[in-house]
Image (tube, rainbow, N blue to C red):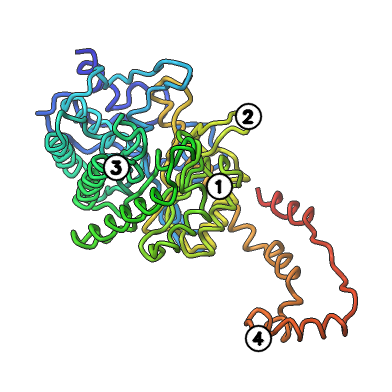
């Protein structure tokens, strides 16, 4: 009963009324028989960099054109259902700290529907038009797969209604890591029954994503890896994973789903070693098994750092190989050794991220999914808004900084000068594969000891920092 009483207050945002966010009509009340009206929106709440209002955008102006695209088209922001509406504040050492006012403490269908209504209320007020979901996050498990699928169908029908004509999933995915059946993996489980169950779950999740107009479908191998090689046949597990992904690609075509299939690399946690360790490892896997034309990569910044790389490195590795499909916009803490999924607020890192995105020509049909969660100690509903606004503003500021760097041109010229010797006729022949080692030896004898110029790293850093 507590949730039924409090939910309408959240839905008109009166809980944050000390900020100038308009409280519109109650749109998605706990009483599921009540019709939903049109929510108020923050989509035009851009007050500029000098604003002191934390509940307004300072840098993200959706309709503003930068480098030939509107900001909303560069960004394609998405709200992650699991962190935003299923996040409890629990961590490996502590119990949940959050019980949102719309929650009633159950995992019932009625609760799932109330949660879904809160999700779309939030999306509309934030002023974005995409969301992401795991199948088991939006609909509860039941005793049988058929009953679970029926639950998912019921929630998908509600989501379709609430989406209206403007909102769509950026991507959907199947949660193949939480249930005990997946303790040894899903596609890489040694038990054939688990493999079949996982395939059935992906089949259904892909159908639901297609039904909702989703633009992509993601595979995150949360337990596709090993704890020790002493009891693991690595080759056999990799073969099984390839067969599983090939089956998914075939099913996508069979149902007419035109979305992009994405693999999300992650090195470890929860397994000691996951098979999709980083972008390069995943690309090698796709090439070996003939899947390189069927998949792209969903790069998560926090996963990049766990694999020993920067996010910029992973983005560039994916980009230069034509595999950059989507970005999970988050970051980690260098003093904490696990995947903390924090909102990205570092302007320098955001600028490097946007540099890769601009070089890629954008991300569509991918975008930026906020695979990020509130800190355990942040327990107010308004914190959900503050976190997303901050994340959106940070990336928008990064885009503006990239525009400055491109307009200035100094950084690009510095890089070009470093390789100017390959811009000669002979350098072009080398890059074209037309020069053998015998010819190179003759040139080395003729030229003598090379004169190696400075790399100008400090100057490059000064130029970069000047744009921040």
Decide if residue 392 is on the left or right side of residue 117: right
Q: Nearer the viewer, mark 4 or mark 2?
A: 4
Nearest the camera: 235 or 464? 235
Q: Nearer the viewer, mark 2 or mark 3?
A: 3
Q: Secondary structure at mark 1?
A: helix
The residue indicated by pointer 3 is 174
The residue indicated by pointer 1 is 397
Q: Nearer the viewer, mark 3 or mark 1?
A: 3
Query: How many neighbours does mark 1 have within 10 angstroms: few (below 14), some (14-19), or many (20 or more)?
Result: many
Q: Secondary structure at mark 3?
A: loop
Query: How many neighbours does mark 4 have within 10 angstroms: few (below 14), some (14-19), or many (20 or more)?
Result: few
Q: CA distance from mark 2 to mark 3?
A: 31 Å
Nearest the camera: 166 or 214? 214
Please tell me which residue is depicted at 44% across the width and 47% down the height of the picture: 234
Residue furthest front as drawn: 230
Q: Nearer the viewer, mark 3 or mark 4?
A: 4
Callout 3 touching callout 4 (CB < 8 Å): no
Q: CA distance from mark 1 to mark 4?
A: 44 Å
The answer to whether residue 136 is seen in the rendering is: yes
Q: CA distance from mark 1 to mark 2?
A: 26 Å
Q: Which mark is residue 434?
A: 4
Q: Which mark is residue 335?
A: 2
Q: Which mark is residue 250?
A: none
């Amino acid at each position: 009963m507590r949730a039924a009483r409090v939910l309408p207050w959240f839905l008109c945002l009166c809980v944050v009324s000390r900020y100038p966010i308009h409280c519109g009509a109650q749109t998605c009340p706990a009483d599921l028989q009540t019709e939903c009206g049109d929510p108020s929106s923050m989509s035009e709440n851009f007050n500029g960099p000098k604003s002191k209002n934390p509940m307004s955008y300072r840098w993200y102006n959706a309709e503003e054109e930068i480098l030939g695209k509107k900001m909303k088209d560069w960004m394609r922001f998405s709200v992650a259902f699991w962190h935003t509406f299923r996040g409890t504040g629990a961590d490996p050492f502590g119990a949940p700290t959050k019980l949102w006012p719309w929650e009633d403490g159950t995992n019932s269908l009625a609760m799932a529907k109330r949660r879904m209504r809160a999700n779309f209320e939030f999306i509309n007020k934030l002023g974005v038009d995409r969301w992401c979901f795991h199948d088991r996050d939006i609909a509860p498990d039941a005793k049988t797969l058929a009953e679970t699928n029926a639950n998912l169908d019921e929630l998908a029908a509600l989501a379709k209604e609430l989406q209206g004509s403007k909102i769509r999933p950026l991507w959907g995915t199947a949660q193949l890591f939480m249930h005990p059946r997946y303790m040894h993996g899903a596609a890489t489980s040694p038990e054939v029954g688990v493999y079949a169950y996982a395939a059935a779950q992906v089949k259904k999740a892909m159908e639901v994503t297609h039904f909702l107009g989703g633009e992509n479908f993601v595979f995150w191998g949360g337990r596709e890896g090993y704890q020790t090689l002493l009891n693991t046949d690595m080759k056999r597990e990799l073969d099984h994973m390839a067969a599983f992904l090939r089956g998914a690609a075939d099913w996508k075509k069979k149902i007419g789903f035109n979305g992009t299939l994405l693999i999300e690399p992650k090195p470890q946690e929860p397994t000691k070693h996951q098979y999709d360790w980083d972008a390069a490892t995943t690309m090698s896997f796709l090439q070996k098994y003939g899947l390189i034309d069927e998949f792209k990569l969903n790069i998560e910044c926090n996963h990049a750092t766990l694999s020993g790389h920067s996010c910029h490195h992973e983005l560039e590795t994916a980009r230069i190989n034509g595999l950059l499909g989507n970005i999970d916009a988050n970051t980690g803490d260098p003093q904490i050794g696990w995947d903390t999924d924090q909102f990205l607020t570092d302007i320098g890192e955001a600028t490097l991220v946007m540099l890769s995105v601009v070089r890629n020509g954008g991300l569509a049909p991918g975008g930026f999914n906020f695979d990020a969660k509130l800190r355990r100690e942040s327990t107010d509903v308004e914190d959900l808004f503050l976190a997303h606004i901050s994340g959106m503003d940070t990336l928008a500021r990064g885009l503006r900084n990239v525009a400055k760097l491109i307009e200035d041109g100094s950084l690009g010229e510095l890089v070009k000068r470093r390789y100017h010797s390959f811009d000669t006729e002979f350098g072009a022949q080398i890059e074209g594969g037309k020069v053998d080692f015998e010819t190179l030896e003759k040139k080395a004898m003729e030229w003598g000891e090379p004169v190696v110029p400075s790399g100008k790293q400090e100057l490059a850093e000064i130029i970069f920092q000047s744009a921040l």
